[in-house]
Image (cartoon, rainbow, N blue to C red):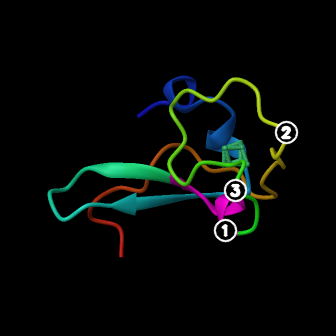
Amino acid sequence: MSAGEVGLCASCRHRRWVASGKGSRFLYCRRSETDPLFPKYPRLPVLRCGGYEAREEREGGPPAASRP
Ligand code: SF4
């Protein structure tokens, strides 16, 4: 999934990629743990978000399946 398909979440410090047992990947928003206004699994792409905070490190899309 490209950064354009993910939107703001691609570079947000609050996102996590989670994998289902069937191999699909979902973007999980950690803001949802402390604020119910944020969905656990936001509909992508996210184009505007009041909770966005840039990651300090640069990362692309979801991690490769073979990455440890
Ligand atoms: S806070 Fe907003 S931009 Fe950041 S991961 Fe959650 S939904 Fe995406």
Which numbered dot is residue 68? none
Tell me: is circle 2 under 8 Å from ligand 1: yes
Image location of residue 43, percent across then percent down: 51, 33
Q: Which residue is mark 3?
A: 36
> Dot 2, crowdedness within 10 Å: few (<14), some or many (≥20)?
few
Quickly name the residue at label 1.
Answer: 33
Q: Which residues are magenta?
A: 28-33
Residue shown at 70%/50% (left/top)?
58
Crowding at dot 3, Cα within 10 Å, few <14 / some 14-19 / many 20+, comes out as: few
- Residue 32 in the image: state x and y as whole percent: 66, 59
Residue 68: percent from the left, percent from the top?
Answer: 36, 76
Q: Tag 2's secondary structure?
A: loop
Q: Is residue 57 above or below residue 49?
A: below
Label the magenta part by its dominant secondary structure. Answer: helix
Horizontal side of 37 relative to 59 (left or right) equals right
Residue sticking out furthest to the left: 22
Question: Given the image, on which type of amino acid does mark 1 rest?
Answer: Glu
Q: Mark 3 belongs to which amino acid?
A: Pro
Marker disc for residue 50: 2
| Label 1 element class | helix
Q: Separation of disc 3 and disc 2 at Cα?
A: 13 Å
Nearer to the camera, 66 or 31? 31
Q: Residue at x 82, y 48 (%)?
A: 54
Give percent across and percent down for residue 49: 77, 35
Going from N to C along the chain, the mark reached first, 3 or 2, is: 3
State the separation of the CA atoms marked 3 and 1: 7 Å
Q: Is residue 56 found left or right of 47 in the rendered image?
A: right
Q: Camera-side residue: 8 or 62?
A: 8
Q: Secondary structure at mark 3?
A: loop
Q: Amino acid at mark 2?
A: Gly
